Image (cartoon, rainbow, N blue to C red):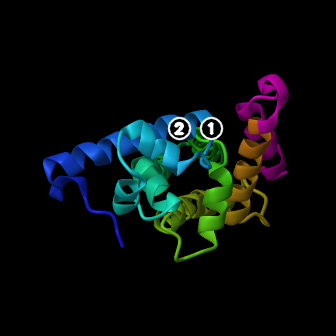
C-alpha cells in the first residue's frame, strides 16, 4: 500500500494526515525515530488504523516527513558543483547533510540501512543524496583536492558517523561542525 497524496484526499482525511505529520515531527524530534506510533496517533486524535492507512510503515512516515528535506539536500549538491573550491563545496554539502540528519535521533541509522535496501521507502531519497555526493566527490577528485582512494559512499558513512558521535557527545562537545571538519582534514589530498 502506498500513501495517498494529500491533494487527492477528502478534507477530513487531509486534516488527519496533516495532524499525524505534525505529531510525528514533534515525537521524532523529542524521542527519535523510534517514538511510539500509537502515541503519535493518540496525540493526533486518531486511531492507529488511521495512521497505518496513511503511513503503512514507520519508513513511509519518515519519507513523508523528510522527502522535501532530502530533495533539497540532493538539489544542494547541484548548486555546490559551481563552488570555486570543489573540496569546500563537498564539505559544505556534507555539513548540511549532517545538520539535517541531526533533526531526529536515529535517522542516520535509518538512512544508512535504506541505502543498502532498494525496497526501503527511504531508498529513493537516500540514493538521490548519494548521487549528489558522487558528483561532488568526482569533481573534488578531478581537481586533485580529495584523496584519490575516497568514494562517495565512504563520505556519506563518515558524515553519518559524525552525526552518530555528535548525538552521543556529552554537552555537545565536540560540535557536529568540528567533527565534520576533522573528517575533511583526513579526506583532503596531501
Drawn side of residue 43 relative to residue 50, left or right: right
Magenta-tinted stretch: 168-190
- Residue at point 15%, 47% (across, down): 11
Q: Is residue 68 left or right of residue 136?
A: left
The residue where tag 1 is placed is: 31
Mark 1, Cα crowd under 10 Å, few <14 / some 14-19 / many 20+, is few
Q: Could you say where residue 188 lies in the image, as x and y percent from the top left? A: 78, 49
* 49 falls in the magenta region: no
Please say if 32 is above or below 71.
above
Marks 2 and 1, how far apart in space? Answer: 6 Å
Q: Residue at x 70, y 49 (%)?
A: 159
> At 61% across and 63% down in the image, what residue appears?
138
Q: Image point 18% across, 53% down: which residue?
A: 7
**Neighbourhood count class around disc 2 (C-alpha, 10 Å): few under 14, some 14–19, many 20 upward:** many
Give the residue at mark 2.
27
Residue 115, above or below 44:
below
Q: Secondary structure at mark 1?
A: helix
**In this view of the protein, can residue 86 be seen by the observer?**
no
The residue lying toward the viewer, choosing from 122 and 53, is 53
x, y percent for residue 117: 60, 74
Residue 171 seen in this snapshot: yes
The answer to which quarter of the image holds residue 169 is top right
Horizontal arrangement in the rendering, residue 7 relative to residue 165 (left or right): left
Q: Which of the labelled discs sits on residue 62, or is there none?
A: none
Quadrant of the rendered image containing residue 30: top right
Where residue 171 appears, x then y in whole percent?
80, 22
Q: Which of 13 and 89 lies nearest the eye of the viewer?
A: 13
Q: Left or right: 31 with respect to 190? A: left
Q: Nearer the viewer, residue 28 or 83?
A: 28
What main secondary structure does the magenta stretch of the protein show?
A: helix
The quarter of the image holding the N terminus is bottom left
Disc 2, disc 1: CB below 8 Å? yes
Amino acid at each position: 500500500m502506498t500513501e495517498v497524496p494529500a491533494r487527492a484526499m477528502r478534507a477530513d482525511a487531509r486534516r488527519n494526515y496533516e495532524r499525524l505529520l505534525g505529531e510525528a515531527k514533534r515525537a521524532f524530534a523529542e524521542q527519535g525515530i523510534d517514538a511510539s506510533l500509537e502515541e503519535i496517533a493518540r496525540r493526533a486524535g486518531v486511531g492507529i488504523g488511521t495512521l497505518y492507512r496513511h503511513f503503512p510503515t514507520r519508513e513511509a512516515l519518515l519519507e513523508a516527513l523528510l522527502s522535501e528535506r532530502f530533495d533539497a539536500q540532493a538539489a544542494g549538491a547541484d548548486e555546490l558543483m559551481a563552488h570555486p573550491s570543489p573540496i569546500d563545496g563537498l564539505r559544505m554539502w556534507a555539513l548540511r547533510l549532517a545538520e539535517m540528519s541531526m533533526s531526529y535521533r536515529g535517522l542516520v541509522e535509518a538512512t544508512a540501512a535504506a541505502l543498502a535496501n532498494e525496497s526501503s521507502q527511504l531508498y529513493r531519497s537516500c540514493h538521490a543524496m548519494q548521487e549528489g555526493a558522487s558528483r561532488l566527490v568526482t569533481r573534488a577528485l578531478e581537481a586533485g583536492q580529495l584523496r584519490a582512494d575516497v568514494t562517495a559512499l565512504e563520505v556519506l558513512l563518515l558524515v553519518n558517523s559524525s552525526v552518530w558521535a555528535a548525538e552521543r557527545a556529552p554537552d555537545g562537545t565536540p560540535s557536529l561542525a568540528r567533527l565534520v571538519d576533522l573528517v575533511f582534514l583526513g579526506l583532503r589530498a596531501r
